[in-house]
Image (spheres, coloured by chain):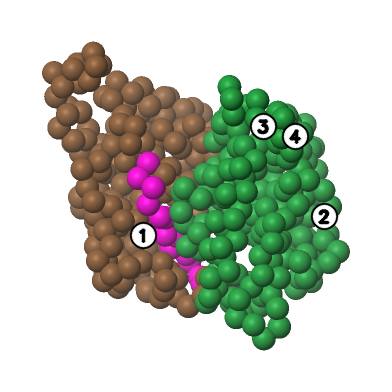
Chain colours: A brown, B green
Amino acid sequence: MPYMGLEEVERLLSTLRQQMTQKNRLLPGGYLYMTDLLGKPDYINAIGRLIASVFINEKLDAVMTMETKGIPLAYAVASQRSIPVVIVRRSSKVTEGSTVSINYISGSSKRIQTMVLPRRSLKENARVLIVDDFMKAGGTMKGMTSMIQEFGAEVAGMAVLVETKEEQPKLVDRYVSLLKLTIPDRQETPIIENGNVYDWLPKQHVNPTKVETKDQA
Amino acid sequence: MPYMGLEEVERLLSTLRQQMTQKNRLLPGGYLYMTDLLGKPDYINAIGRLIASVFINEKLDAVMTMETKGIPLAYAVASQRSIPVVIVRRSSKVTEGSTVSINYISGSSKRIQTMVLPRRSLKENARVLIVDDFMKAGGTMKGMTSMIQEFGAEVAGMAVLVETKEEQPKLVDRYVSLLKLTIPDRQETPIIENGNVYDWLPKQHVNPTKVETKDQA
């Protein structure tokens, strides 16, 4: 697997921070317009490589995401490991055969929601990495961990591209975030900081000696 | 762009035909269970490379698909060209800002449906390649061509992974299909043939001399 070095990590995060703080990205309800960025395969593939680098030492059998924005990210991560993607949906589709359905509480709106997954999607004991584009309180993430348990499988990790700083505490812990979003009152420009991803990168990433050795090789 | 040679094309199509004719894939309503195959990044990336090879001589500015099954295929194609993906949705999402909405007739069920696309998604005169996983009568494909016209953009091509043989004539012409599905009466196993993709591959693909030259290089 192509492994992402520290310099490339910072270059990627810096590009994303810059792009996301452009004007006109703020939408009603505390959301950020990211559709254009998530539409660019070069960004998506780089983000996928970064997330895969975080979990490089983990045994992974599948990547899970909730439809629809997280789908390209999930494939970008899964491509690095040649493992399948399983997509959780909001309602069952005729093209998916029999499904398992669970209810969960949306963290921010406190509404009861449903998510479904085809019965054939996940094997028992599979180690599953959850990937999504955006996390507010973490209700969807928590729902996906319940779904994984429902299949007798195991959560190997959780990663999001952007988490909000405001909603605290999150409904899940031990997640990786690449970026952290704050929307200041009465301002047009969101504040984007790095998330907790540097805490998660495997040791060889944060040890400068090893990075140098790698560069010289 | 890595270009797919004829032998690899046939190897890929043969693998897919074999996988799709496994038992237990037929679903009510004449659908085929493909979720597991579409979940495998290695297949998806190879299919994307094949579709990109068909359009290698075309100027393309974006790849369009309808949520949700076509999304990974669209990214796989777009990755080969480093062009953006635009995802048409069934209803507008709060995270997408203002949208353009059109109605279209689903080809098989004859129902009026809605599709929406964020206003910022497509530039005027952009050349757009439409990609989807499955086509019955072609209503969704036709809807996407209308959407592209609505934005003053241009359809550069259409490609589907699987078309059905039964629904004829299709509502669109000049589309590329990789595979063609027939569901025989009272049988458990679908019949999968190659689609029209060989008619579409650029000349160097179907000219054996040139292929040899390429192999020797």
Task: Name the residue tied to disc 3.
Answer: B211
Residue A159 in view: yes
Give the magenta-colored segment's residue range. A80-94
Q: Is residue A194 magenta?
A: no
Q: The numbered mark 4 sits on a residue in which chain? A: B
Q: The numbered mark 1 sits on a residue in which chain? A: A
Q: CA distance from mark 2 to mark 4?
A: 29 Å
* Residue drawn at (35%, 45%) of the image: A81
Task: Kindly identify which numbered label has been placed on residue A140.
Answer: 1
Is the residue at mark 3 from the same chain as the one at mark 1? no
* Residue drawn at (37%, 52%) of the image: A83
| Image x and y of residue B178, in percent | 67, 53
Task: Kindly identify which numbered label has been placed on residue B207.
Answer: 4
User: Number of labelled discs?
Assistant: 4
Taking depth in this image into account, of A169 and A207 the one nearest to the observer is A207
Is the residue at mark 2 from the same chain as the one at mark 4? yes
User: In the shown orientation, is residue B148 left or right of residue B45?
Assistant: right
Whether pointer 3 and pointer 4 mark residues with C-beta atoms closer than 8 Å, the reply is yes
The answer to whether A216 is drawn above or below residue A179 in the figure is above
Task: Name the residue tied to disc 2.
Answer: B172
Taking depth in this image into account, of A100 and A134 the one nearest to the observer is A100
Q: Counting residues from the N terminus, which is met first, the one under dot 3 or under dot 2?
A: 2
For mark 3, does the 10 Å Cα neighbourhood hold few (<14), some (14 to 19), or many (20 or more) residues?
A: some
Per the image, label 2 sits on a secondary structure element best described as loop
